[in-house]
């Protein structure tokens, strides 16, 4: 098993490119089940979750070829051209348990083939993330839903349009129902929809396939169902969470770093908090530049659904707050177990106290290198970020979490001046 070893103290400089967005790639891979032909996705990030989704699609009978550019042919468009059903309608536990996004095949399978059997999802251990909103919406569209033995079995001859009001803005729930609705008979309205850029991206690609969707990226999405969709070629947008993580890395090392291809319009809340902490952030033609100075101050952060401050950036900002002047307060409102990185940061000398979903951080002059254990994807990133400024050596274990969402993070950081390497644990 690999670990990341960091010698802290080096300032980041130069530039780091941003890979394609994991949280856009996964629903787009699932959406490739919908059209009657082979779709091509470009700028695909080389991540463990993407590999797992490709394995899942192959199990369902898809032909998936390539790496950075993926060609996905659903079962109805095999090499022989013969129309056929999937070999299996099932997304099994062994694949879905490590990646919550596996549940995204539910909507496309039911919409295109009339049936899906999907294991209840896993992923990071950051709290309950039920799929009740997915199932509520599918039932409203006429599907028969049955839960048994850890699986959800959904069947429908053809879904019909419905008016769906989500209890909360769930990203995967919005995406699943959006993909289900594009082939449903009639008109569907999804209220209280998630507004994340990745949801807007999915709506854009589905429209390129021939879907009729308005309102993607807004709280109300309207879909008029069509009979068939066409394959598409599309380049995946840059990953805003990876971009935000590298902005924090540049700031915490007091470096001068251009995060290339970062889209500032997707990072408003992150940029605002960095500037509020005294960090210089400028938008340039090639991306976003961060310059860290010596006077970083504490910050108050409350995680919220997009366009609010993203929960996926909370851990990285906690590492930044650990060495900022004064006191910071971070409130986590999305997931109930997303402070598991706190004990590891404390091992490095951070002064952090938690009470339920609130963390109070008092900045210290310097962190100390230590051996720390990653507990989830973004916690991994926060420990790497902290290790960049910690005195001595930091070893981050369980980096398989990191590989689920960051494409060889250590190589990108090393090219920007970090003293970091991956070794066998």
Image: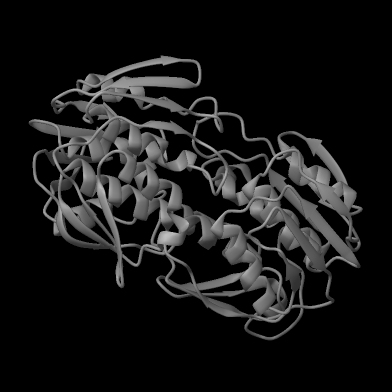
Residue drawn where x is 17% and y is 36% of the image: 295
Direction from residue 206 to residue 110 in the image, left or right: right
- Colour setup of the view: one colour
Residue drawn where x is 50% and y is 21% of the image: 357
Above or below: residue 80 compared with residue 182: below
Above or below: residue 123 compared with residue 418: above
Direction from residue 74 to residue 367 in the image, left or right: left
Q: Position of residue 337 (x, y in %)?
A: 50, 25
Q: Position of residue 266 (x, y in %)?
A: 47, 57
Above or below: residue 236 compared with residue 300: below
Q: Is residue 366 shown to the viewer in this render?
A: yes
Q: Is residue 400 shown to the viewer in this render?
A: no
Q: Quadrant of residue 87?
A: bottom right
**Which one is nearer the viewer's eye here, 109 or 203?**
203
Which quadrant of the rendered structure holds the C terminus? Answer: top left
Direction from residue 109 to residue 359 in the image, left or right: left
Q: Position of residue 390 (x, y in %)?
A: 14, 32
Which quadrant of the rendered structure holds the N terminus? Answer: top left
Above or below: residue 285 compared with residue 150: below
Direction from residue 340 to residue 250 in the image, left or right: left
Residue drawn where x is 27% and y is 35% of the image: 320
């Amino acid at each position: 098993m690999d670990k990341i070893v960091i010698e802290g103290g080096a300032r980041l400089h130069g530039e780091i490119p941003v890979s394609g967005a994991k949280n856009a790639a996964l629903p787009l891979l699932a959406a490739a089940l919908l059209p009657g032909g082979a779709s091509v996705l470009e700028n695909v990030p080389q991540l463990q979750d993407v590999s797992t989704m490709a394995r899942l699609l192959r199990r369902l009978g898809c032909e998936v070829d390539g790496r950075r550019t993926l060609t996905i042919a659903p079962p109805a468009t095999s090499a022989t051209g013969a129309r056929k059903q999937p070999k299996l309608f099932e997304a099994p536990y062994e694949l879905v348990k490590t990646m919550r996004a596996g549940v995204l095949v539910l909507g496309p399978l039911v919409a295109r083939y009339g049936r899906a059997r999907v294991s209840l999802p896993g992923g990071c251990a950051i709290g309950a993330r039920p799929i009740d909103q997915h199932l509520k919406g599918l039932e409203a569209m006429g599907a028969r839903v049955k839960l048994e033995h850890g699986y959800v079995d959904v069947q429908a001859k053809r879904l019909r349009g419905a008016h769906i009001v989500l209890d909360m803005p769930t990203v995967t729930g919005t995406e699943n129902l959006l993909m289900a609705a594009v082939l449903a008979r009639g008109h569907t309205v999804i209220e209280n929809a998630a507004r994340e850029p990745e949801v807007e991206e999915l709506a854009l690609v589905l429209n390129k396939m021939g879907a009729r969707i308005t309102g993607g990226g807004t709280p109300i999405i309207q879909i008029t169902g069509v009979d068939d969709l066409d394959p598409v070629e599309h380049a995946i947008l840059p990953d805003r969470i990876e971009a935000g993580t590298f902005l924090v890395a540049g700031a915490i090392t007091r470096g001068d770093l251009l995060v290339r291809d970062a889209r500032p319009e997707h990072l408003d809340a992150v940029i605002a908090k960095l500037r509020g902490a005294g960090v210089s952030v400028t938008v340039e033609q090639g991306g976003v530049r961060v310059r860290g100075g010596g006077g970083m101050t504490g910050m108050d952060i409350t995680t919220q659904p997009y366009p609010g401050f993203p929960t996926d950036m909370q851990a990285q900002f906690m590492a930044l707050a650990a060495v900022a002047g004064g006191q910071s307060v971070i409130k986590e409102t999305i997931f109930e177990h997303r402070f598991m990185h706190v004990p590891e940061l404390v091992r490095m000398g951070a002064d952090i106290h938690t009470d339920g979903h609130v963390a109070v951080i008092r900045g210290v002059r310097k962190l100390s290198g230590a051996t720390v254990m990653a507990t989830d994807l973004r916690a991994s990133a926060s420990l790497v970020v902290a290790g960049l400024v910690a005195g001595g050596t930091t070893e981050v274990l369980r980096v398989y979490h990191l590989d689920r969402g960051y494409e060889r993070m250590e190589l990108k950081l090393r090219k920007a001046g970090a003293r970091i390497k991956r070794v066998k644990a």
